[in-house]
Image: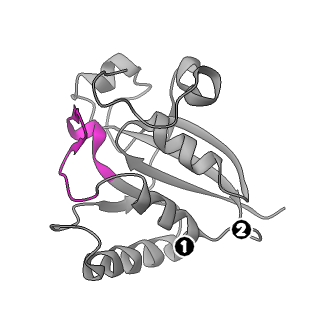
């Protein structure tokens, strides 16, 4: 098996993880925090919006079965990349749209995909997704892992917060 990692921020990580977990070729998913400066942040730390971290999903995938480009399609389809630091009722930099690339090929693919999405007319407004090098991934608390698989659901609720 030829596995690689991909890391995406698209708002509430529960629904994003559930979307990626359904993709053939995805070996595992984990939710956590990345892109900030605080070491070993907790969920409460990240919720306060002072860590610089985004809620993210780290995807391990078999690149002989699923391409990074296919994962980008899932990413674009599971959130609104035109809202700065916001997804639905969740507001703050921790909910930003972000692609954290792990190598030069992912960086190129992410930039090309973003440009293609911007020109496609699929979204109203400018895409604000950041594309930055992957940094340390801090795994979220266990009760967040595969949350919808354990507790039911398939999308982040619009009327309540985690």
Q: What residue appears at the point 58 percent right and 50 percent down from the top-left corner?
A: 20
Residue at figure coordinates x 29%, y 40% from the top left: 95
Q: Position of residue 42 (x, y in %)?
A: 41, 20
The one nearer the camera, 55 or 153, is 153
Q: Looking at the rendering, in which quadrant would you find the C terminus?
A: top left
Q: Is residue 61 above or below residue 115?
A: above
Q: Which residue is mark 2?
A: 63
In the image, residue 41 lies at what x, y percent? 40, 24
Q: Is residue 117 above or below residue 11?
A: below
Location of residue 70 by image quarter = bottom right
The residue to which callout 1 is attached is: 69
Helix, strand or loop at disc 1? Answer: helix
Task: Indicate left or right for 123 with 6 as reference.
Answer: left
Instruction: Mark 2: give few (<14), some (14-19) or many (20+) Cα within 10 Å.
Output: some
The structure residue drawn at horizontal position 44% and vertical position 78%, both measured from the top left corner, is 108
Among numbered discs 1 and 2, the one appearing first in the sequence: 2
């Amino acid at each position: 098996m030829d596995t690689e990692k991909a890391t995406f921020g698209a708002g509430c990580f529960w629904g994003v993880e559930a979307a990626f977990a359904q993709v053939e070729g995805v070996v595992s998913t984990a939710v956590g925090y990345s892109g900030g400066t605080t070491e070993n942040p907790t969920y409460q730390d990240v919720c306060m919006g002072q860590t610089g971290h985004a809620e993210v999903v780290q995807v391990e995938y078999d690149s002989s079965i699923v391409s990074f480009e296919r994962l980008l399609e899932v990413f674009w389809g599971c959130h609104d990349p035109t809202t700065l630091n916001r997804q639905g009722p969740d507001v703050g930099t921790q909910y930003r749209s972000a692609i954290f690339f792990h190598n030069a090929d992912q960086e190129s693919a992410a930039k090309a995909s973003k440009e293609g999405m911007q020109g496609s007319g699929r979204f109203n407004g400018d895409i604000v997704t950041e594309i930055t090098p992957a940094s340390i991934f801090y795994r979220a608390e266990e009760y967040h892992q595969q949350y919808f698989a354990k507790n039911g659901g398939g999308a982040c609720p619009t009327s309540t917060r985690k």
